[in-house]
Image (spheres, rainbow, N blue to C red):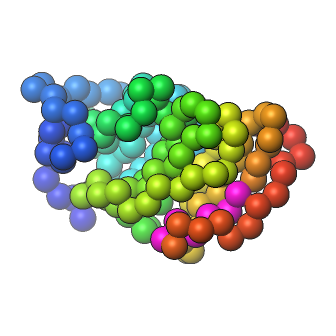
């Protein structure tokens, strides 16, 4: 399952990088669904992290490993991201009013779907179901929307209001 290392600029939606950047991963950073401080495994040894308005993908191996940057379509950045290594997909929510959620396949980074209408101001949490094509999103105040999406069909399976804010 260990394929060739990812190199910046290898995908059409990624931002080209001449020299790959590296990072060190600490145990407390590995938290699925966390945006700025967390990381999630997309596959066996490939980590995904939010880096401003980009998703950074790279090996969890020693320093010097190359990385890929996938740019978000919004200038405001990314509020939260998550991955499902079983389904080989990743998702992130853009920052801004009425944010969209983008679901991409991995490793091709092809856009599989754009999910809209789950929150008014910001999505503060995302999580994939383990064995289904479901993605859960939680919106911040004022709406506190809780949505269960079928990301494959791009439809809302269930919608409710959360009892407490993120």
Is residue 35 shown above or below 108?
Answer: above
Is residue 86 shown above or below 33?
Answer: below
Numbered disc total: 0
**Magenta-highlighted stretch: main secondary structure?**
strand
Residue drawn at (54%, 32%) of the image: 95
Residue drawn at (29%, 54%) of the image: 109
Residue drawn at (52%, 28%) of the image: 36
In the rendered image, the residue lying farthest to the left is: 18
Image quarter hosting the N terminus: bottom left
Q: Which residues are magenta?
A: 147-152
Residue 58 placement (x, y as % from top left): 28, 41
Q: 120 and 14: which one is in front?
A: 120
Residue 46 placement (x, y as % from top left): 32, 49
In the rendered image, the residue lying farthest to the right is: 163
Is residue 114 shown above or below 55?
Answer: below
Residue 34 vs residue 72: left or right?
right
């Amino acid at each position: 399952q260990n394929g060739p290392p990812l190199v910046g600029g290898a995908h059409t939606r990624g931002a080209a990088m001449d020299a790959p950047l590296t990072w060190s991963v600490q145990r407390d950073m590995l938290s699925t669904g966390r945006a700025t401080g967390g990381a999630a495994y997309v596959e066996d040894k490939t980590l995904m992290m939010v880096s401003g308005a980009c998703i950074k993908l790279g090996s969890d191996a020693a320093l010097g490993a190359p990385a890929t940057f996938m740019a978000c379509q919004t200038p405001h950045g990314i509020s939260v991201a998550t991955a499902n290594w079983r389904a080989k997909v990743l998702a992130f929510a853009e920052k801004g009013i009425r944010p969209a959620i983008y679901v991409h396949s991995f490793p091709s980074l092809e856009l599989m779907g754009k999910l809209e209408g789950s929150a008014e101001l910001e999505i503060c949490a995302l999580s994939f179901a383990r064995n289904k094509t479901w993605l859960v999103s939680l919106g911040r105040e004022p709406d506190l929307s809780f949505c269960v999406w079928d990301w494959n069909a791009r439809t809302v399976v269930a919608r409710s209001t959360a009892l407490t804010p993120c």
